[in-house]
Amino acid sequence: MPLTIRVDDLSGEPTRALVAAHLAGMLENTPAESVHALDADRLAAEGVTMWSAWVDDELAGIGACKDLDAERAELKSLRVVDAFLGQGIGRALVQHIVEDARERGIRSLWLETGSTEDFLPARRLYASEGFVECPPFPPYAADPHSTFMTREL
């Protein structure tokens, strides 16, 4: 399965649709005040890099990285299309984002994900890629629906 990961400007309908589905999915499982996923406009903002993963001409997943400062960045909006779950797309995106951050001189990556059972696969993926649980980091506050993780690069 040839996988291509590329920077995405969010101008294409498949990517925008997956971002919208990701946000809708977060709102189905989490109270609105605890949803921190970004919409397409915020993912296209200055200081955020968005990637899309493609198998041939089919969108397989997305992931983003938001700069927090010169040495810290936050992994955002990791989502794999249901048809591609379990095929390593999410792991490939995380590894790609980690490598890009390292090349840009970022010293640590941070993330917020859900704390419920629905998010267990995501937490396991992040832990297997070296992320460890940590206290909330700015701009977040403690939230029973959130798990915070970080990884030194």
Image (tube, rainbow, N blue to C red):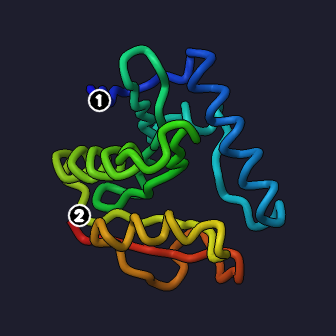
In the image, taking residue 93 as reference, residue 40 lies left or right, namely right
Q: Is residue 96 above or below residue 40?
A: below
Going by the numbered disc 2, the residue's amino acid type is: Arg
SS at mark 1?
A: loop
Identified at 62% across, 38% down, the residue is: 42
Q: Which residue sits at x=23%, y=64%?
A: 107
> Where's the N terminus, which quadrant?
top left
Where is residue 122 drawn, in percent x and y?
50, 63
Towards the viewer: 51 or 123: 123
Q: Is residue 137 above or below residue 134?
A: above
Q: Is residue 2 above or below residue 106?
A: above
**What kind of residue is marked 1?**
Met
Q: Residues within 10 Å of mark 2 (few under 14, many from 20)?
A: some
Per the image, the residue denoted by label 1 is: 1
For the residues labelled 2 and 1, the Cα–Cα distance comes to 32 Å
Looking at the rendered image, the disc whose residue lies closer to the viewer, 2 or 1, is 1
Q: Position of residue 34 (x, y in %)?
A: 75, 67
- Quarter of the rendering containing residue 12: top right
Q: Is tag 2's residue or tag 1's residue first in the polypeptide sequence?
A: 1
Q: Quadrant of residue 75?
A: bottom left
Q: Is residue 14 left or right of residue 58?
A: right
In the depicted structure, whether residue 130 falls above or below residue 135: above
Count of all numbered marks drawn on residues in the image: 2
Q: Which quarter of the figure is the C terminus placed in?
A: bottom left
Instruction: Identify the image quadrant of residue 132.
Output: bottom left
- Return the mark for residue 107: 2
Viewer-proximal residue, 25 or 143? 25
